[in-house]
Amino acid sequence: MQLQSERLNRVFFKELLASDFFSINSVLVTPTCARCSRLFGIGELKKEERRGNITNLKISDSTATLNIYTNKTIRLQEPEKDFMAFVGKLHVRADKGRGFIILVEEAAAVNEEARNNWILTTAKRTMERIEQLRRLEKNALAKKHWAREAIEHYAIDDDRLDALADMAINAVRNVLLYYSKTAGEIILEVLEAADKNGMKREKLTTELEKKGLTGESIEEALEYLIAEGICYEPEVGIVRVVEQ
């Protein structure tokens, strides 16, 4: 299934769960001033509870675990981890003040790479909103009454923005670690298939580029493997796997 997600809001779950300000027409405004009525998210399915025709899904994007609800059957296929993408509509809960629930409109199974790409894009958009708040585009944002009211409601200041930026940075850091480990596995496969005396960096890089890795990701992964004591350089320019 191809979800129609390009124009939908992407907000980290931790920020969404900290949101409780509603503007006109019950539109939720988050601390970074994202206006959310519909949301596109991707995460790892942690728990599934079915009650009658409604299923409560607990899904994590690495910053927090979010509850979403659906009456649809979702077929997840990953053998070790189940990742899903969803488009959901936010509904105000009349019985709990101004809280909200998320009802799934579309959903599909995805792989971990899709989840990681969602994190990178969401972090970019989050940082853009934070930067706009720091500059306050004072004449653009402050003229919008909903933005001004949200800033006052959340008591947005530099410390609060720093905390939100740290949330986005940590999410990206986890993704980069994932890619470093994945690239590291490919590097080990190539080195283990090579001469036991090791392989020249230039030749190793050429072989890895054939497998789709870039120069920067190769260097980062090699540094990771060397720092972890998995590989070493017996001499300058030669990489070798540490014998177990």
Image (spheres, grey):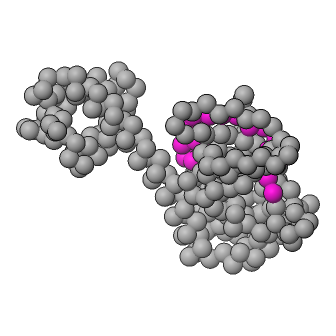
Q: Quadrant of residue 5?
A: top right
Q: Is residue 194 above or below residue 125?
A: above
Tell me which residue sits at (78%, 58%) in the image: 35
Quarter holding the C terminus is: top left
**Rendering coords of residue 166 (x, y %):** 51, 64
Q: Is residue 219 above or below residue 135?
A: above
Report if residue 25 is visible in the image: yes
Q: Quadrant of residue 205?
A: top left
Tell me which residue sits at (57%, 33%) in the image: 78
Quarter holding the N terminus is: top right
Q: Nearer the viewer, residue 219 or 243?
A: 243
Q: Quadrant of residue 64?
A: bottom right
Task: Report the side of 81 relative to 89 (left or right).
Answer: left
Q: Nearer the viewer, residue 124 or 223?
A: 223
**Rendering coords of residue 77 (x, y %):** 61, 30
Tell me which residue sits at (22%, 42%) in the image: 230
Q: Is residue 244 magenta?
A: no
For the record, the magenta segment spans: 101-122
Q: Is residue 96 above or below residue 168?
A: below
**Rendering coords of residue 54 (x, y %):** 83, 46
Q: Nearer the viewer, residue 117 or 242?
A: 242
Which residue is at the far left? 235
Task: Report the side of 227 relative to 100 (left or right).
Answer: left
Q: Nearer the viewer, residue 99 or 26?
A: 99
Task: Report the side of 205 relative to 130 (left or right).
Answer: left
Report if residue 113 is visible in the image: no
**Rendering coords of residue 220 (x, y %):** 32, 43
Q: Is residue 117 magenta?
A: yes
Tell me which residue sits at (77%, 69%) in the image: 20
